[in-house]
Image (cartoon, rainbow, N blue to C red):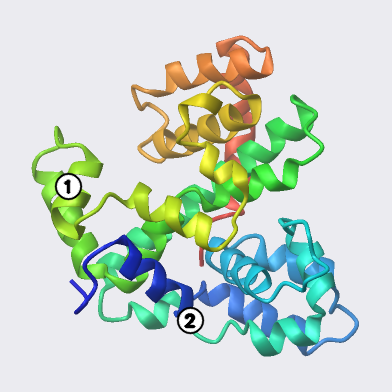
Amino acid sequence: MRQGMRGVDDWVAFLSKADIPVLKRTGRELAVLRQDPEKLGARKVAEVISRDPLMTVKLLRYLQSHRSRNQTNDVLVVEQALIMLGLDVFFNRVPAEHSVEEVLHTHLDALTSLLHVVHRAHRASGYAREWAVLHLHDMHYEEVRIVALLHDLAEMLMWCFEPEAMLEIRHIQQHDKALRSRDVQKQVLGFPLIELQHELAKAWNLPELLLSLNDTEHSRHPRVRNVELAINLARHSANGWDDAALPDDYKDIGELIRMSADEVMAMVAMESGAACDLSRPH
């Protein structure tokens, strides 16, 4: 355990000042764009950032901590955030200097686990966005996508900054699969990751929808259900397309978007190959 880090408040304070590492691919692609004035634009830069949950939250955290007095609404769309900041400010103040590959070069098992979480988050965000646009006609689909992308933010950050503890958690769970994740996390870290996630979302003014995911009062809201079901599908399919939980996922998704479970299964099967492979971290 990192010296002096005993509770959620300690971690929120530390992470609020920490230089969050990003995917190596993100830094490389941003550097290429910056060197080519003809391609450099808010939309192109946003496309790169939006594939990386760590870079996304790094940008949103900076923007919220430097918001002007005239800014009354939270900015939750990456391209809009870039336009408000300006690209020069973004590249100078929110640089993609440190990569997770560099930070975890001595913890390759932790790096592999982190990249799996990132890949899963990207798949979930793709599902959530598609259902929001095509089936739920949600005008704020980008917020839904970002919330799905950031759902496991606390886990990603702890893999970056506390890899040994996270590996211990994984080791314990592998040896006793009946243990609940939050119980093992509390045993090793002193708190469940969902508690850290909640406090980070509040401290960094992340989307309100992110806080609603664990609130039973909002559990049946279509936007909340959209994100939850997208996360479930990404998590269960990561175990293989024969995972025992997938039939229930198809049924629940069908109830949300008014399709049969068989239609959902066919839709997911058709889209998963090409769309999901694009999100694999390199």
Asked if the residue under mark 2 is in contact with the one under mark 1, i.e. CB atoms within 8 Å, the reply is no
Q: Is residue 7 left or right of residue 175?
A: right
Q: Quadrant of residue 182?
A: top left
Secondary structure under tag 2 reads loop
Q: What residue type is labelled 1?
A: Val
Q: Which mark is residue 243?
A: none
Q: Mark 2 points at which residue?
A: 19
Q: Quadrant of residue 42?
A: bottom right
Q: Is residue 119 left or right of residue 56?
A: left
Image spot of residue 169 (x, y percent): 18, 54
Give the residue drawn at x 40%, y 65%.
157
Mark 1 surroundings within 10 Å by alpha-carbon count, few (fewer than 14), some (14 through 19), many (20 or more) = some
Considering only order in the chain, which callout, 2 or 1, is on the residue closer to the N terminus? 2
Give the residue drawn at x 68%, y 71%.
63
Eyeballing the image, is 269 above or below 100? above
Image spot of residue 237 (x, y percent): 43, 35
Q: Quadrant of residue 40?
A: bottom right
Eyeballing the image, is 191 above or below 24? above
Q: Does residue 46 appear anywhere in the picture? A: yes
Give the residue drawn at x 69%, y 40%.
129
Give the residue drawn at x 55%, y 87%.
97
Q: Nearer the viewer, residue 245 or 214?
A: 214
Q: Mark 1 points at which residue?
A: 184
Q: Which amino acid does label 2 sit on?
A: Asp
